[in-house]
Image (spheres, rainbow, N blue to C red):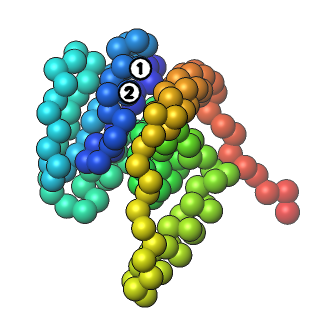
Amino acid sequence: MTTTIYVDGDACPVREEVFRVSGRLGLPVRVVSNGSRPARPPGLPLVETVVVAEGADAADDWIAERIGRGDVCVTADIPVAARCLERGARALSPKGRPWTTDNIGGALAGRTVAQGLREAGVATGGPAPLTRADRSRFLSALDAEVAAGGRDATAPPPRPWVSFE
């Protein structure tokens, strides 16, 4: 089973870095978008560009329905990362932060608080621009997540938790 890298592609600032890692490791990449921000296909043999129907969550749903154990999703969208983790996949932010079962709950809660503040009229600002250090951190983290995904894909499935009550 080969690790596939899924890219939540509508606003991904690290596509070129993903393509570089894909070429070096020979891994397939699926760049998924709803076409609202068209991206030119890179013309690389391992990169598939998937354009889904327009809609707020169409690209998210496409990724979440197909990603599986051993795969990696690159996304800044915390709910997408949570859905990928639920499917046994790995998820990574464009700034190189791995999303895990240990940190996704807090990230979802923080997102909800920030959304409430925005709705109340408080200016929360957007994410800071990507720096050269962020891109370097992302590349290192992507290598680590791909390696871990490969181990996940070949390991036996996790045993279900059983209550002793």
CB atoms at circles 2 and 1 under 8 Å apart?
yes
At horizontal 57% and vertical 60% (from top left) the residue drawn is 107
At horizontal 15% and vertical 57% (from top left) the residue drawn is 54
Residue 79 lies, in percent from the top left, at 45, 58
Amino acid on which the number 2 mark rests in the picture: Glu
Quadrant housing residue 122: bottom left
Location of residue 71 with respect to 116 vertically, above or below: above
Secondary structure found at label 2: helix
Residue 147 lies, in percent from the top left, at 56, 22
Amino acid on which the number 1 mark rests in the picture: Val
Location of residue 36 with respect to 91 vertically, above or below: below
Residue 142 in sight here: no
Q: Which residue is mark 2?
A: 17
Q: Which residue is mark 1?
A: 21
Secondary structure found at label 1: helix
Camera-near label (2 vs 1) is 2
At horizontal 35% and vertical 14% (from top left) the residue drawn is 23
Crowd rating for badge 2 (residues with CA inside 10 Å; few <14, some 14–19, many 20+): some
Residue 108 lies, in percent from the top left, at 54, 64
Q: Residue furthest bottom?
A: 120
Residue 28 in sight here: yes
Mark on residue 104?
A: none
In the displayed structure image, the side of residue 7 where residue 33 appears, left or right = left
In the displayed structure image, the side of residue 71 where residue 51 appears, left or right = left
